[in-house]
Amino acid sequence: QVQLVESGGGLVQPGGSLTLSCKASGNIYDANTMGWYRQAPGKQRELVATITTGGPTNYAESVKGRFTISRDNAKNTAYLQMLALKPEDTAVYYCNFQQWPRVVALRPDNYWGQGTQVTVSS
């Protein structure tokens, strides 16, 4: 089992910045992927950004150039730096962790953080 604890959400003005953190603990293997999804009221949950243990990243087109995802493998912690925030970035942000178990499996293991609210408003 893997546990995720995320933090860093809050209320900011348009153009402001926030940094989210997500720390994983438990049965963590060397190769895994961490990232964030977000969900706004009335909309489907969408992938924001992901990063693998080795470093490759993936971003939604709507956040490219504004958000940066990084990680500290020694601390099993991922960070999402959000710059130039817009009202449309308002959502609950959920940390995600994915890895293949050490036994034969039909699918990788997926874990979710508790979610943190990001509100961009004047």
Image (cartoon, rainbow, N blue to C red):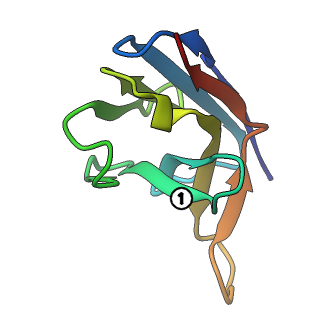
Q: Residue furthest left?
A: 65
Q: Which residue is mark 1?
A: 46
Which residue is drawn at the image coordinates 61% and 50% (left, top)?
Answer: 96
Which residue is drawn at the image coordinates 47% and 37% (left, top)?
Answer: 88
Where residue 107 appears, x then y in whole percent?
Answer: 65, 82
The kind of residue tagged 1 is Glu
Crowd class of label 1 (few under 14; some 14 to 19; many from 20; radius 10 Å): some
Q: Quadrant of residue 69?
A: top left
Q: Quadrant of residue 115?
A: top right
Q: Horizontally, is 43 left or right of 55 in the view? A: right
Where residue 56 appears, x then y in whole percent?
Answer: 25, 53
Where residue 49 appears, x then y in whole percent?
Answer: 40, 48
Q: Horizontally, is 22 left or right of 48 in the view? A: right
Residue closest to the eye, 22 or 42: 42
Q: How many marks?
A: 1
Q: Is residue 109 above or below residue 80?
A: below
Q: Is residue 89 above or below residue 38?
A: above
Q: Residue furthest front?
A: 122
Which residue is drawn at the image coordinates 34% and 54% (left, top)?
Answer: 60
Which residue is drawn at the image coordinates 32% and 48% (left, top)?
Answer: 62
Where residue 14 appears, x then y in whole percent?
Answer: 41, 16
Residue closest to the eye, 12 or 52: 12
**SS label for mark 1:** strand
Residue closest to the eye, 21 or 119: 119
Q: Horizontally, is 71 left or right of 43 in the view? A: left
